[in-house]
Image (tube, rainbow, N blue to C red):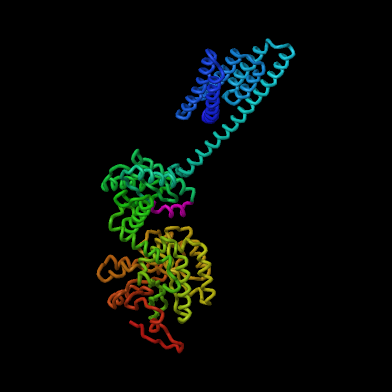
């Protein structure tokens, strides 16, 4: 209320001061002797008081409502005193109307109803006191006018106060809602940690201070798998427990917030060195990795963190975030479950990645991207039974870019859909020229498996070309499936329902369970080259490959041995009874025009012997 009324009083005091400065000048011109001094002194004092009170209100903070009431009442009494003294010294009957005028003024300057009532009552009583010496008829008129003026003034005062209170209440409600909205905007309502907006505000605040700090991005490992396996309700409870443990790592120099999903931001202020930051990060990692007891289940997850230091590695909030994000991405690749600090050498790598992403966004996909095909050879049938389509990119700006560079960038940038669809069309068109017993294997990325609309698009491409669904095999990896198990299972079920085959690539490198693999309804498993290439030299690798082949045969899956590079490897692997082999010993990836030696011409005669 005080904050609402203070501007009203300030607005009233300024014209009041200017008016009484004018009145002071008028008294000095019109009056003489002691009357001049008395009237001029009182009006000048009123003007000075109004100016001083206005200045004090402008400078003061948190002025009480009672103080404002007394300031307004004092101004009213000074105004009243000016009129009363003038009438006492120079009574003029016509000027009794001044008391009516100031009573109207008091409805504004009287902050409370009681002060307005006191001021108006005093003015009307004084007017009637001065009018006591006039004729009875004239006195009756003044009484009537005084009563009417009093009713009007008091009524106006009441209505004005009521309107002001209503406005103040609305303002208070609006301020409360604004505070709540700001709180909600700055708070993650699930975990009650500071939210994304608060995280970036903290970065900006630290930069504004000009002091060094560390910014970390924390990503939970395995959370999506838990969310898919046990449902979002348990996933939400898990995030709440994670938040509790994060709060345990915070102090006056530490600020942890949730950016969204399973990603958290960590600001560490103060002059900490890298060793101290790594130690704090290790403590939090250990805390987050401890088992969670939720819904009668024992849940295990991990976390990976990427750090960037300000100002040694970044000079703006945007750079701080982007470089911490790059460090997190690199940590996911090289030291999952640990932490990685953005370093000087990462700048060049980040610049190259940015240039690659820019070129990828601007690329003419249909023109710049092509396919090479690598044969899959059946040991049982002694012939090539399929080709795996492998993407190749020749950029006018960057030249030849290997898949292990552009595919991760495409996934991070959300560009895989258009790339997948374009390359799949080319792969299907190529397969139309192959014999009916030769299949097409095409790789899907983790991002593809989360795109629910992509399945129908791929099937539409097959249908439009007239290719048999059974000749198309989609290859996936364990890690890509585990990023979103629920979406992946739904996507693969769509392909299987149409008659396409599913192969699991890089088997042995992931961390999925046999129960989850069974849910994928696989047709084929490809054993990773890391095991196959050591079969001749490492007994453990040989036993593992034998066990994996046996597992495939036991559950009715075909088995592909990848990375077979030499004839010696091939001869060794024949005895292990694998179904298919793939590697340089059969053929390197090659464009469509170089596949003729693996195919059969229209007459049915083999163009090249692929018997070993």
Q: Is residue 434 above or below residue 24?
A: below
From the viewer's side, name the closer residue of 340 and 286: 340
Q: How many marks?
A: 0
> In the current view of this chain or complex, which residue is farthest to the top?
133
Q: Is residue 82 left or right of residue 246?
A: right
Q: Is residue 382 left or right of residue 129?
A: left
Give the image location of residue 326, x and y in percent: 35, 56
Q: Is residue 344 left or right of residue 482?
A: left
Q: Is residue 435 above or below residue 263?
A: below
Where is residue 150, by image quadrant? top right
From the viewer's side, name the closer residue of 589 and 103: 103
Give the image location of residue 471, x and y in percent: 47, 75
Magenta stretch encompasses residue 196: no
Q: Is residue 270 left or right of residue 6?
A: left
From the viewer's side, name the closer residue of 532 and 425: 425
- In the image, the segment drawn in magenta is 219-231
């Amino acid at each position: 209320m005080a904050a609402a009324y203070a501007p009203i009083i300030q607005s009233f005091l300024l014209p009041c001061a200017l008016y009484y400065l004018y009145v002071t000048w008028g008294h000095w011109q019109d009056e003489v002797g002691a009357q001049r001094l008395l009237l001029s002194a009182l009006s000048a004092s009123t003007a000075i008081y109004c100016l001083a009170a206005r200045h004090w209100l402008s400078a003061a903070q948190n002025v009480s409502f009672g103080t404002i009431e007394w300031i307004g009442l004092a101004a009213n009494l000074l105004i009243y005193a000016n009129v009363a003294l003038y009438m006492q010294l120079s009574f003029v009957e016509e000027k009794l109307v001044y008391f009516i005028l100031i009573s109207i003024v008091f409805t504004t300057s009287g902050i409370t109803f009681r002060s307005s009532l006191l001021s108006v009552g005093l003015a009307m009583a004084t007017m009637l006191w001065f009018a006591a010496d006039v004729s009875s008829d004239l006195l009756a008129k003044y009484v009537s006018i005084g009563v009417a003026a009093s009713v009007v003034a008091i009524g106006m005062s009441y209505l004005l106060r009521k309107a002001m209170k209503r406005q103040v209440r609305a303002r208070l409600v609006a301020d409360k809602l604004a505070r709540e909205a700001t709180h909600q905007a700055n708070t993650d309502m699930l975990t009650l940690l500071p939210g994304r907006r608060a995280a970036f505000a903290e970065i900006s605040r630290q930069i504004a201070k000009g002091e060094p700090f560390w910014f970390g991005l924390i990503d939970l490992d395995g959370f999506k798998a838990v969310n898919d396996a046990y449902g979002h309700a348990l996933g939400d409870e898990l995030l709440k427990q994670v938040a509790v443990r994060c709060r345990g790592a915070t102090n006056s120099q530490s600020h942890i917030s949730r950016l969204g999903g399973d990603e958290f931001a960590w600001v560490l202020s103060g002059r900490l060195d890298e060793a101290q930051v790594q130690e704090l990060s290790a403590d939090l990692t250990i805390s987050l990795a401890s088992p969670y007891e939720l819904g009668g289940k024992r849940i295990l997850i991990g976390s990976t963190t990427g750090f960037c230091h300000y100002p040694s590695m970044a000079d703006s909030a945007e750079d701080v975030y982007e470089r911490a994000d790059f460090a997190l991405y690199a940590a996911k690749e090289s030291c999952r479950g640990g932490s990685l600090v953005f370093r000087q050498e990462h700048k060049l790598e980040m610049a190259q990645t940015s240039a690659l992403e820019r070129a990828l966004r601007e690329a003419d996909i249909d023109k710049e991207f092509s396919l090479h095909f690598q044969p899959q050879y059946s040991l049982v049938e002694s012939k090539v039974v399929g080709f795996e389509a492998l993407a190749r990119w020749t950029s006018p700006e960057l030249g030849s870019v290997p898949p292990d560079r552009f595919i991760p960038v495409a996934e991070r940038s959300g560009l895989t859909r258009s790339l997948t669809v374009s390359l799949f069309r080319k792969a299907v068109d190529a397969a139309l020229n192959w014999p009916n017993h030769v299949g097409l294997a095409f790789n899907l990325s983790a991002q593809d498996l989360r795109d629910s609309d992509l399945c129908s698009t791929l099937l539409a491409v097959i249908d439009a070309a007239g290719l048999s669904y059974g000749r198309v095999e989609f290859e996936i990896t364990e890690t890509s499936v585990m990023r979103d198990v629920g979406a992946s299972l739904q996507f693969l079920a769509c392909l299987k329902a149409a008659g396409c085959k599913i192969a699991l690539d890089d088997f042995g490198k992931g961390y999925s369970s046999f129960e989850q693999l069974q849910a994928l309804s696989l047709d084929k498993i490809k054993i990773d080259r890391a095991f196959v290439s050591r079969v001749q030299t490492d007994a453990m690798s040989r036993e593992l490959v034998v066990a994996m082949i046996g597992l495939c045969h036991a559950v009715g899956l075909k088995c592909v041995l990848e990375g077979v590079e030499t004839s010696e490897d091939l001869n060794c692997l024949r005895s292990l009874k694998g179904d298919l082999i793939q590697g340089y010993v059969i053929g390197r990836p090659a464009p469509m025009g170089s596949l003729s030696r693996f195919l059969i011409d229209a007459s049915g005669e083999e163009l090249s012997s692929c018997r070993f």
